Image (cartoon, rainbow, N blue to C red):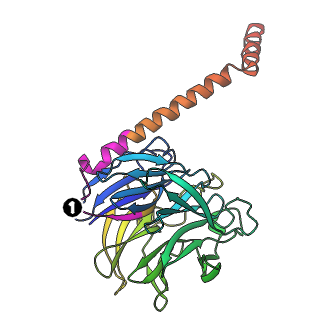
Amino acid sequence: MRFAVAFCNQQSTPKLSVCVIDVDSGARAWLDVPAAFDRGAAGITRRGDELLVACQPGGIVRYGPRLEPLALLPTPEAGNLHSILYRDEERAVYVVSARDDTLYRYVLDDTGARFVRCDTVYCADPQGRGQDRYHLNSVAFWNGEPYVTCFGPTEGATHRDRRNGRVLRVADGSTVVDGLYHPHSLFVHDDELLVIESQARVVRRVAGGEPCAWHIDGGYPRGIVAGAPGRVWVGVSALRRESMSLGTANVMTSTSPVDYCTRLVELDLGTGELGRSIDLTLLAAEVFDVHALPLPDAFVPDPDGGLPARIEALEESYRAMRAAKRDVEHELGSSPWQRARRFARRVRSRLS
């Protein structure tokens, strides 16, 4: 088995946002990304022998059969992209835009090289304020119909205060299940509809069978893909140390090391037991999506599991930050106020 993994919120190393991982050998390879990846990647979907990957701020990258980037398809209507889903029968990509709580449908031309139309399929905010009030974040087609997840309106200052998440049927906006604490990653598995309740660390079956819950140890699960029969792999992110909405430090109470690891874990849906685990902590902090790749896909493993590229990218990021800091200090030092202060200090030293 081979998976493509999308890492989101990669501010420090945005060029390392998509990684291919061979489950059995542990080999890894970073995929090249366009410059537009200035924050990280989000949803992944396939179109024939191409891979489509959402860029968080906006736009979708086409990867060819050899996993080389072909083009960036703009999505001007959609921003803060989350899950995406290609529908071959419609020749369209469904795109979840958390920026305005809207599900868009982008129709491709015959060649798949560009979008020719954009339709608004569903908006979770009935007043259309475009403020990420409901945090629409994933989409799946079950029994031929689209379903979505959202966190629900916030009751406090951050996403952590959103505790009434829902799975919704797009056709009529009806609620399939509510009361979820951060639902993500709607996924159809063997005619059943699954969802990850991230803050509760649970994978739930919400349709297609009796309700059921499977627990994941530690971290923040998000992203799911089918594995061997009766099994799925779940992406697990390290707990976030800083609030994305406020930019302030989160209060961390856990002392369990597993809460601060980035992983892929195998879940047996028959027994609820967790099987193999692949540690990705040294590559990134947050997994958004996991997608299966056919084994014939081109795959050239990076040396030492892709870690040297990560270290080099971090060092490049640190150099850029240090240069920016020096520029700011120089600019402040050249301001009229700073020049006046230096002059006053010289005058005082001569008079003393």
Q: Amino acid under label 1?
A: Ser
SS type, badge 1: loop
Whether 257 is among the magenta residues is: no
> With 254 as the anchor, is 153 left or right in this view?
right
Q: Which residue is drawn at 55% across and 75% down?
A: 147
Residue in the foreground of this view, choosing between 350 and 3: 3
Percent from the top left, x then y, of residue 154? 69, 68
- Indicate whether 318 appears above or below 83: above
Whether residue 195 appears in this view of the structure is no
The quadrant the N terminus occupies is: bottom left
Residue in the foreground of this view, choosing between 352 and 90: 90
> With 229 as the anchor, is 166 left or right in this view?
right
Q: Which residue is drawn at 44% across and 84% down?
A: 192
> Of all residues shown, which one is farthest toward the bottom?
210
- Quadrant housing residue 26: bottom left
Whether 301 is among the magenta residues is: yes
Magenta-drawn segment = 290-312
| Residue with the mark numbered 1 | 25
- Quadrant housing residue 135: bottom right
- Indicate whether 311 appears above or below 87: above
